Image (cartoon, grey):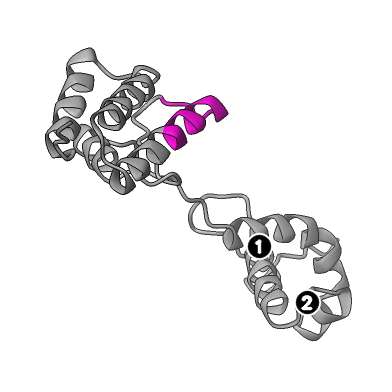
Amino acid sequence: MLHHRSSPQTRPILPDDGGDMHPRCREMADTMRELFSVGGGVRFNDLIRAGFTNAEIVEFKEQATRLATEASTRQIWSRPDLLADIIEKARAPLPNRPPLPRDTKETQALLVAWGTYCAARASLVLDPWPGQRERCLALLALYLNRLPIFPANRMTVMRAVEQMLPQVAQ
């Protein structure tokens, strides 16, 4: 009986990092990303022209597609706001930039409360009067009470904003 021993050329080369992804699968994923960026899609014939065999396409296409999609998708996470960030955002409020400290879930109610504070601050700039100033501080307090921050930190933010608001005489 003839024993066939595989040569280094016929044995698959497995990745060094210990993962179970075949190198040809990684190559196919890279090729798919390139083809998609150039032509907007990846067809079977495109992969054949790129040098992949029918067997490789059948075996790796699904996994390579997933890998190509993951590599093409950028995840963006913003860090939670620190106390200094909260003060800065409260001093110069923008509706699309609410202060969100750690463990804060961005809810519709929270965004509405922040938007209301931003509108009141804009009104104070246009028509400064004592009642409007107090309204701004009250709305900021309502927003801050919804955040998971310590009462001492709430007071620090309130004092910082109160000091920078225009002093309006009657």
Instruction: Kindly identify which residue carries mark 1.
Output: 68
Residue at 29% across, 19% down? 149
Residue type at mark 2 is Phe
Give the magenta-colored segment's residue range: 104-116
Position of residue 164 relative to residue 103, above or below, is below
Real-space CA distance between mark 2 and mark 1, rounded to the nearest whole angstrom:
16 Å
Residue 104 vertical placement versus 38 (above, below): above
Question: What type is the residue that disc 1 sits on?
Answer: Ala
- Give how far across and how far down residue 106 sits, in percent: 50, 31
* Secondary structure of the residue carrying numbered label 1: helix
Q: Which of 117 and 60 is in front in this view?
A: 117
User: Looking at the image, which residue is at 42% across and 26% down?
Assistant: 104
- Mark 2 closeness class: few <14, some 14–19, many ≥20 residues within 10 Å: some
Residue receiving disc 2: 52
Q: Which mark is residue 105?
A: none
Residue 99 painted magenta: no
Name the residue located 37 percent from the left edge and 21 percent from the top edge: 147
Identify whether 36 is placed above or below 143.
Answer: below
